[in-house]
Amino acid sequence: MAAAKKKKALQYADKPMNRVGNRIYYGNLEDKFILALDILETEMVGDVETATKVKILLMDNSGELGKGDIYRKAERTNLYKALEIGAWWLEDALASVQG
């Protein structure tokens, strides 16, 4: 009997991404900070629904997921631009607590 395949999480820049509805959590759940990306608006581009407005939230991750204090926030016009700035914020925040 074949072993069950373990589903691998989607990753960006070596950090996992988990989607819950219109919110994407980016980062390791064990770290002090996590990034939340809220998809506020979408539009159809051909047959694909594409995000056209994304809110970025750098959050404290010491309590319940998605309920921590917000340290930085911004909006961008697509998911790639949001991840680009958010990943930098997250790396900077994590580096500041490590040393």
Image: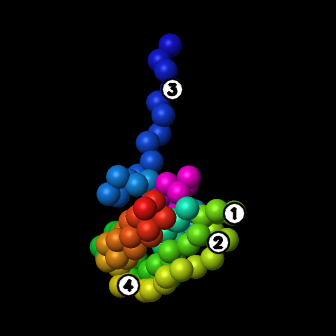
Q: Amino acid at mark 2?
A: Gly
Discs 2/3, front? 2
Q: Can residue 22 be seen by looking at this rendering?
A: no
Residue at numbered disc 3: 4
* Residue 35 x %, y %: 49, 69
Nearer-the-camera pick, 74 or 9? 74
Residue at numbered disc 2: 68
All told, the count of numbered labels is 4
Identify whether 30 is placed above or below 25: above
Which region is colored magenta? 24-31
Q: Of callouts 1 and 3, which one flags the residue occurring earlier in the amino acid sequence? A: 3
Q: Amino acid at mark 1?
A: Glu
Q: Secondary structure at mark 4?
A: strand
Residue at numbered disc 1: 64
Q: Can residue 59 be seen by looking at this rendering?
A: yes
Marks 1,4: beta carbons within 8 A: no
- Name which residue lies at 35% across and 52% down: 14
Prevalent SS, magenta region? loop
Q: Amino acid at mark 4?
A: Arg
Marks 1,2: beta carbons within 8 A: yes
* Residue 85 x %, y %: 34, 76
| Location of residue 79 (image quadrant) | bottom left
Q: Of callouts 2 and 4, which one flags the residue occurring earlier in the amino acid sequence? A: 2
Q: Of callouts 1 and 4, which one flags the residue occurring earlier in the amino acid sequence? A: 1
Label 4 Cα crowd, 10 Å radius (few <14 / some 14-19 / many 20+): some
Discs 2/4, front? 2
* Residue 20 x %, y %: 57, 62
Marks 2,4: beta carbons within 8 A: no
Disc number placed over residue 81 in the picture, else none: none
Residue at numbered disc 4: 76
